[in-house]
Amino acid sequence: MQSLGRHVLAEVYGCSFEVLNDIQKVEDIMINAALEAGAEVREFVFHKFSPQGVSGVVVISESHLTIHTWPELGYAAVDVFTCGDKVNPWDACNYLAEMFGANYVNASEVKRGIMEGQSECLVANI
């Protein structure tokens, strides 16, 4: 596979309700996570749900960070996708877990890229 990027998918548990439900805190933490990882922030947008929860995306030159929170469960679903060798998605995930006050994180990395010898798009029936 010709690697184009690294995509970390993280389930973040035992987080602070107050942090996960505060749009400004979530936004600041996500932006700073990108910067901690060495990324270049381009744009960001966040939305506060009623009665609780925050979703958002930070667009970086190297790809993106996304989040959706369930404050009532102390849970956040996080994606960190980075391209190139300069930015380490694990640095961003570790920063997020620390700032959210997580008790436990279950994360995995998926290599993103193009299969060698594949010149056409294949569609799989799922």
Image: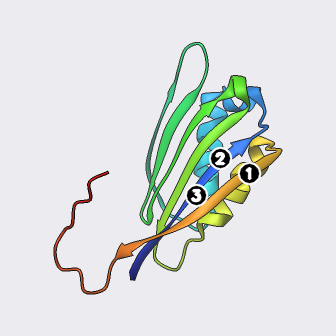
Give the residue at mark 3.
Answer: 34
The residues tagged by marks 2 and 3 sit, at their Cα atoms, a distance apart of 18 Å
Q: Residue furthest bottom?
A: 117
Residue depicted at 76% across the width and 46% down the height: 99
Could you tell whether 46 is left or right of 18 in the image?
left
Q: Residue at x 68, y 32 (%)?
A: 20
First in residue order: circle 1 vs circle 2 = 2
Q: What's the residue type where badge 2 is placed? A: Glu
Measured in 3D between alpha carbons, the distance from the residue under mark 1 to the one under mark 3, in whole angstroms, is 18 Å
Image position, residue 95 (x, y; %): 72, 56
Which of the two residues, 113 or 50, is positioned nearer the viewer here?
113
Q: Dividing the picture into quarters, in which one does residue 36 lie?
A: bottom right
Q: How many marks?
A: 3
Mark 2 crowd level (few <14, some 14–19, many ≥20, 10 Å Cα): some
> At 65% across and 57% down in the image, what residue appears?
107
Q: Quadrant of the N terminus?
A: bottom left
Image position, residue 32 (x, y; %): 63, 52
Give the color scheme: rainbow, by chain, secondary structure or one colour: rainbow
Residue under pointer 2: 11
Quick check: marks 1 and 2 in contact, CB under 8 Å? yes
* Label 1 residue SS: strand
Q: Label 3 near label 1: C-beta < 8 Å?
A: no
Label 1 – label 2 distance at C-alpha: 6 Å
Residue placed under numbered mark 1 in the picture: 105
